[in-house]
Image (cartoon, rainbow, N blue to C red):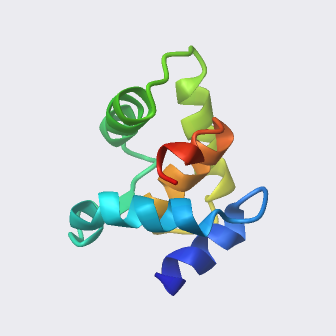
C-alpha cells in the first residue's frame, strides 16, 4: 500500500485521502494484481474509452461532456511515468470530480 500512496502523493492536488485510497485498492485488487490491467495506457484509445465507461460513468455515476478531457488531463499530469498506475489514475480522476467519498 505504501507504494501506491507514494505514487498518488506525486500527483495529487491536495493531501491524499488514505482511507479512500485503501478502499480503492481493495475494490480494484484483482485488476491491480494482473500485469496487463495494472496500468493505464494513455496511447490506447480503447483503454481510455474503458476508463470513461467503466470507471467514470458506471462507478462514479458521471455523465458530463468533459469526461474525455479529464482523462487526457490525468494522462498529461502523469506523462513523466511510463507505467501509469491504474490506482493512481483512478484516484486522480475521483479527486478531480470530488468523488473520493465514493470510496471512503
> Quick one: 9 or 80, which is closer to the camera?
9
Q: Position of residue 48 (x, y in %)?
A: 40, 38
Residue 77 placement, left or right of 89? right
Q: Position of residue 45 (x, y in %)?
A: 37, 36
- Numbered circles on residues, count: 0
- The structure residue drawn at horizontal position 33% and vertical position 65%, both measured from the top left corner, is 26
Question: Toward which corner of the image does residue 55 lie, by quadrant?
Answer: top left
Q: Is residue 67 above or below residue 103?
A: above
Question: Toward which corner of the image does residue 53 lie, by quadrant?
Answer: top left
- The structure residue drawn at horizontal position 46% and vertical position 68%, both measured from the top left corner, is 22
> Quick one: 51 or 4, which is closer to the camera?
4
- The structure residue drawn at horizontal position 54% and vertical position 54%, both measured from the top left corner, is 91
Q: Is residue 98 visible?
A: yes
Q: Position of residue 102 (x, y in %)?
A: 49, 43
Q: Position of residue 46 (x, y in %)?
A: 30, 36
- The structure residue drawn at horizontal position 54% and vertical position 26%, both measured from the top left corner, is 67
Residue 7 placement, left or right of 23? right
Q: Is residue 20 above or below residue 101?
A: below
> Quick one: 12 or 98, which is closer to the camera?
98
Question: Toward which corner of the image does residue 8 lie, by quadrant?
Answer: bottom right
> Quick one: 16 or 81, which is closer to the camera?
16
Q: Is residue 85 visible?
A: no
Q: Is residue 50 above or below residue 23?
A: above
Q: Is residue 66 above or below residue 44?
A: above
Residue lying at the far right in this picture: please name it.
14
Amino acid at each position: 500500500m505504501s507504494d501506491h500512496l507514494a505514487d498518488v502523493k506525486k500527483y495529487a492536488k491536495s493531501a491524499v485521502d488514505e482511507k479512500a485510497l485503501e478502499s480503492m485498492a481493495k475494490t480494484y485488487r484483482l485488476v491491480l494484481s494482473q500485469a496487463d490491467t495494472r496500468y493505464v495506457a494513455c496511447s490506447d484509445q480503447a483503454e481510455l474509452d474503458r476508463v470513461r465507461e467503466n470507471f467514470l460513468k458506471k462507478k462514479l455515476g458521471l455523465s458530463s461532456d468533459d469526461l474525455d478531457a479529464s482523462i487526457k488531463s490525468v494522462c498529461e499530469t502523469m506523462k513523466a511515468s511510463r507505467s501509469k498506475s491504474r490506482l493512481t489514475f483512478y484516484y486522480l480522476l475521483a479527486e478531480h470530480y470530488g468523488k473520493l467519498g465514493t470510496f471512503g
